[in-house]
């Protein structure tokens, strides 16, 4: 099922909810939309997991968790009021400030991915990147001549992804990068055109390189994903 069909199904479900409310078929005291709208978030999170081949992607898990929390709160099955959780924003803001020493996430990444660190590990990846670092750090070096992108994540950790010896397996390749309370440094060849397009919350994503001319570019690397209280840097 494509993303377009899934988005259409979400709109159909939302329309049915509104229809039940406007026609009164759900009962006079039942607010279907106000009560069950988090089910759409749950469906979105589950869809993200299914689309990724049952990989537990952080973004999908966050959306799924938010949907579950809001739904339980609306059904009065949750002991806490969602409004009581606002101090979490202060915690995230504090972590974001810590992570911005020098540049976004660089301080935390250097602390975790430092030479000689027992917690850091270095690997040579194949044609797809799939590293996930949680409360740890690592370096990944890609030498594939048919690089296809993939998905990498650093959660309360750091990652140095070295693509300088790789070649793109297509004219346009997508890499999904997820950073939460951490940092990620991505090193790319000089002849790659890089488009940095992650969603950023209390963090930063920076292109620390000079882009090649369009006619000189060997291909395009599109970096998507999300950055929460952390940072991504792309350089040569």
Image (spheres, helix red, strand yellow):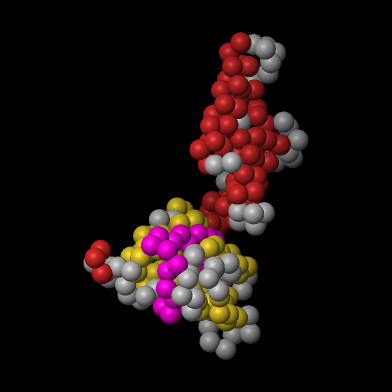
> Quick check: is 167 in the magenta stretch?
yes
Image position, residue 35 (x, y; %): 65, 27
* Image quadrant occupied by the N terminus: top right
Which residue is rendered at x = 51% and y = 38% of the image? Answer: 4
Image position, residue 233 (x, y; %): 41, 69
* 90 or 140: nearer the viewer: 140
* 209 or 155: nearer the viewer: 209
Q: As drawn, is 210 to the left or to the right of 226?
A: left
Q: Is residue 25 above or below residue 146?
A: above
Which residue is rendered at x = 35% and y = 65% of the image? Answer: 219
> Quick check: is 174 in the magenta stretch?
yes
Per the rendered image, the range of residues in magenta is 162-183
Answer whether residue 48 is visible to the viewer in this image. Answer: yes
Which residue is rendered at x = 60% and y = 27% of the image? Answer: 13
* 62 or 70: nearer the viewer: 62
* Image quadrant occupied by the C terminus: bottom left
Q: As drawn, is 169 to the left or to the right of 84?
A: left
Quarter-wise, where is residue 25 in the image? Answer: top right
Which residue is rendered at x = 43% and y = 80% of the image? Answer: 165
Q: Is residue 111 above or below residue 155?
A: below
Image position, residue 199 (x, y; %): 45, 53
Image position, residue 218 (x, y; %): 33, 69
């Amino acid at each position: 099922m494509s993303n377009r069909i899934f988005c259409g199904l979400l709109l159909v479900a939302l329309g049915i909810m509104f229809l039940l409310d406007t026609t009164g078929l759900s009962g006079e005291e039942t607010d279907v939309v106000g009560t069950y709208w988090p089910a759409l978030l749950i469906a979105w999170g589950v869809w993200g997991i299914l689309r990724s081949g049952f990989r537990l992607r952080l973004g999908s898990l966050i959306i799924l968790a938010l949907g579950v929390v809001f739904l339980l709160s609306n059904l009065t099955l949750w002991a806490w009021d969602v409004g009581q959780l606002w101090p979490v924003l202060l915690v995230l803001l504090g972590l974001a400030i810590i992570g911005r020493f020098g540049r976004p996430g660089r301080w935390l990444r250097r602390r975790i991915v430092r030479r000689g660190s027992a917690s850091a590990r270095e690997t040579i990846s194949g044609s797809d990147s799939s590293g996930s670092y949680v409360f740890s750090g690592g370096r990944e070096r890609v030498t594939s001549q048919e690089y296809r992108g993939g998905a990498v994540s650093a959660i309360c950790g750091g990652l140095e992804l070295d693509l300088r010896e790789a070649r793109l397996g297509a004219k346009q390749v997508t890499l999904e990068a997820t950073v939460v309370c951490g940092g990620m440094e991505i090193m790319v060849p000089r002849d790659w055109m890089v488009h940095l397009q992650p969603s950023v919350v209390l963090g930063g994503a920076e292109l620390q390189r000079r882009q090649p001319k369009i006619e000189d570019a060997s291909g395009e690397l599109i970096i998507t994903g999300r950055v929460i209280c952390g940072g991504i840097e792309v350089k040569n």
